[in-house]
Image: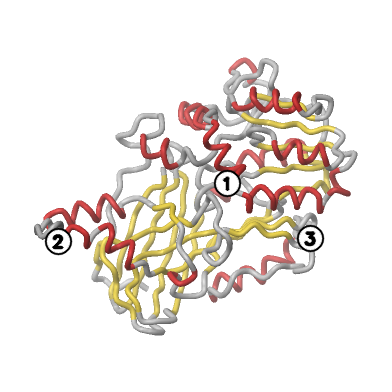
Amino acid sequence: MFPSENHSNGYQHLPAGMGMGMGHSHRERVRRGTRRSRASPSSHSLRVCDDQRQSQHHRPPCTDFDVAYFHSYSHLGIHHEMIKDRVRTETYRDAIMQHQSFIAGKVVVDVGCGTGILSIFCAQAGAKRVYAIDASDIALQATEVVKANNLSDVVLVLHGRVEDVEIDEEVDVIISEWMGYMLLYESMLGSVITARDRWLKPGGLILPSSATLYMAPVTHSDRYSDSVDFWRNVYGIDMSAMVSLAKQCAFEEPSVETITGENVLTWPHVVKYIDSYSVTINELESVTANFKFNSMMRAPLHGFAFWFDVEFNGHAISSTNYHLATPFIDNHQMNGGQRKKKSNSNEALVLSTAPEDPPTHWQQTLIYFYDPIDLEQDQVIEGLVRLSQSKENARFMNIHLQYTTGGRSFVKESVMR
């Protein structure tokens, strides 16, 4: 697939985490003062890492990276950004009410509860008991929010990791807003899988029920011009000596930003379909997909965009009928077509982060090239994308792209950290 001639159209990164402290960089604290720390148990005395309990059952160790990650979610600004995302929050509330018959009188686990808003929605839907689990210190505020709403007899906030907390009963429902940028960044889905395998009753409900990650080639001349061409003439001064550095600074790392459908050059391709009832932790360590696109227009190719959607289908797609759903998805992956059709368009609630849908705080994730590639209409772009967890810090994601177009082969390596 890839000619022997290789052109580097990207920047070779050090492995994720090398040269970095365990904490978040200033850029991450500012831009991702924008997302997440959620994931684990007991509001009374259990802490993020409780070494005295490690011997009770097999669980992954709580690393310094985990502690830093959980600590980042103690900042209220992250939760403020997520809650004020109306597409996100109202879709979850609608999903809870749509599945009220599965929740009323039942036991629910909220994995990564944050401020507790989803747990409260479940209590309002009639849940008998809700275990609201979070490893961040935001769990302390969640406890106060629950008290203020007179729900302490229903919602029990557990401060610690899902991997460490003990719940002495099976649960009927697991709900979690686990999605990170590019769907898999931060690896929080592993905590949902752990909760499922530890506590969910056979036939229990998981919300969301499935997720799909998409990619597509994009053109974005304004972004390239603003970041790179700006330096060619600055107040009449030739500063083109800055161009190489400008490309590195602007395009070395994945960029979380908002694009529109006009930036997308082809129908998107399914990179990964996730069934909440059957996905395994090992399956998430490395995701590889081959792709083939045909440009629908003549335009410069500036990179690839990634986005996702999640569905709240209840039991419409579960481990018992997973074999009925995957052939369609696999064929979709091979041919690279439009977004996955809904299994039941009348009932399925979808939370989408696609460029053509209302914007969310996830936006889209773009992997830019250092130099654009001129495309003709119907020109083929084919290659491979591999998303893998960093060996040093599983919450970081290594992104490997290799692609061929116009008889030339390229490789782009980047790290989302």
Quadrant housing the N terminus:
bottom left
| Residue appearing at x 27%, y 49% in the figure | 249
Dot 2 or dot 3: first in sequence order is 2
Check disc 1 and report the residue beneath it: 282
Which of the two marks, 3 or 1, is nearer to us in this view?
3
| Residue appearing at x 81%, y 49% in the figure | 97
| Whole-percent x, y for residue 6 in the image | 25, 67
Task: State the SS at label 3.
Answer: loop
Q: Residues within 10 Å of mark 2 (few under 14, many from 20)?
A: few
Q: CA distance from mark 1 to mark 2?
A: 50 Å
| Whole-percent x, y for residue 51 in the image | 58, 18
Question: Where 135 falls versus 297 (above or below)?
Answer: above
| Whole-percent x, y for residue 132 in the image | 72, 32
| Residue appearing at x 79%, y 68% in the figure | 346
Task: Give whichever of 93, 40 is nearer the camera.
Answer: 93
Q: Is there a contact, CB below 8 Å, between mark 3 and mark 1?
A: no
Task: Give whichever of 337, 284 is nearer the camera.
Answer: 337
Check disc 2 and report the residue beneath it: 233
Horizontal side of 378 relative to 312 (left or right) equals left
Question: Where 365 falls versus 52 (above or below)?
Answer: below
Check disc 3 and report the residue beneath it: 316
Q: Can you tell which quarter of the image residue 80 is in?
A: top right
Task: State the SS at label 1.
Answer: helix
Q: CA distance from mark 2 to mark 3?
A: 57 Å
Task: Give whichever of 50, 378 is nearer the camera.
Answer: 378
- Residue sitting farthest toward the left: 237
- Residue sitting farthest toward the front: 235
Q: Residues within 10 Å of mark 3 (few under 14, many from 20)?
A: some
Q: Can you tell which quarter of the image residue 310 is in?
A: bottom right
